[in-house]
Image (cartoon, rainbow, N blue to C red):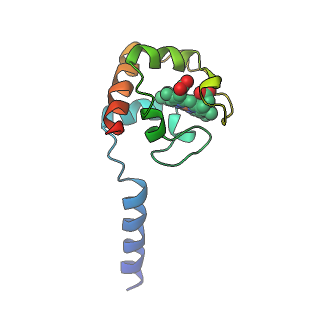
Amino acid sequence: MKYAVLILFFLILCLTVCAQDIPDSTKKILGKYTCGSCHSYEMRLIGPSWKELAQKNYSAKTLANLLRNPEPTNWPDYPPMAPIPNITNAEAKILAAWLKELKN
Ligand code: HEC
C-alpha cells in the first residue's frame, strides 16, 4: 500500500515536471549548455520562461547572436545572461524552431 502511494506521488510529480514535451534534439542542447538551470517551461527562474521567450519570435540567426552576445536591455527585469559563445548555428536553428512551436 505504501508503495502504491509512493508510485502515485512520483507519477504526479513526473506529470508536472517531465511532461513538457520537449523534443530530444532540443533537450540535448538545453542539457549541454545547462539552459534549464535558468529557464523553465512556464515559470520564471533566473531568466524568462521558454514560453515568454517564444513570444519574441527570434529567427535562428538572431537567436544565435543573442546567445553569443546577450542584450540584457531586452529583459530589464532580469539579471544579465552569461554569454554562450560556443553555441553553433545548427543548435540555434533547432532551438529557434522549437521556440516557434511553443508560441502557438
Ligand atoms: C545563468 C543563467 C542562464 C543560463 C545558463 C541561460 N540563460 Fe538565457 N537568459 C538568462 C537571463 C537572466 C536572461 C534575461 C536577461 C538577458 O537577456 O540577458 C536570459 C535571456 C535569454 C533569451 C532572450 C534573449 C533576448 O535578448 O531576448 C534567450 C533566447 C535565452 N536566454 C535562451 C537561453 C538558452 C537557449 C540557453 C542555453 C543555451 C540559455 N538561455 C542559458 C539566464 C540564463
Tell me the quarter of the image containing the N terminus: bottom left
Q: In the image, residue 4 lies at what x, y percent?
A: 36, 79
Q: In the image, residue 3 lies at what x, y percent?
A: 39, 79
Nearer the observer, 74 or 44 = 74
Q: Left or right: where does residue 75 sit relative to residue 54?
A: right
Q: Does 14 sit above or below residue 69?
A: below
Nearer the observer, 36 or 97 = 97
Q: Left or right: where does residue 56 sit relative to residue 24?
A: right
If the picture is divided into quarters, which one holds ligand 1? top right
Count of marks placed on residues: 0
Q: Does 84 sit above or below residue 47?
A: above
Question: Does residue 73 appear in this view?
Answer: yes
Question: Does residue 82 appear in this view?
Answer: no
Q: In the image, residue 82 lies at what x, y percent?
A: 63, 25
Q: In the image, what residue occupies the spot 66% across and 35% down?
A: 78
Q: Does 72 sit above or below residue 24?
A: above
Q: In the image, what residue occupies the spot 43% across and 34% down?
A: 55
Q: Residue 103's image quarter?
A: top left
Q: In the image, residue 17 lies at what x, y percent?
A: 43, 55
Tell me the quarter of the image containing the C terminus: top left
Nearer the observer, 17 or 55 = 55
Q: Residue furthest bottom?
A: 1
Q: In the image, what residue occupies the spot 36% across and 49% down?
A: 20
Q: Residue 96's image quarter?
A: top left
Q: Left or right: where does residue 68 sit relative to residue 100?
A: right
Q: Residue 45's image quarter?
A: top right
Q: In the image, what residue occupies the spot 39% across and 67% down?
A: 12
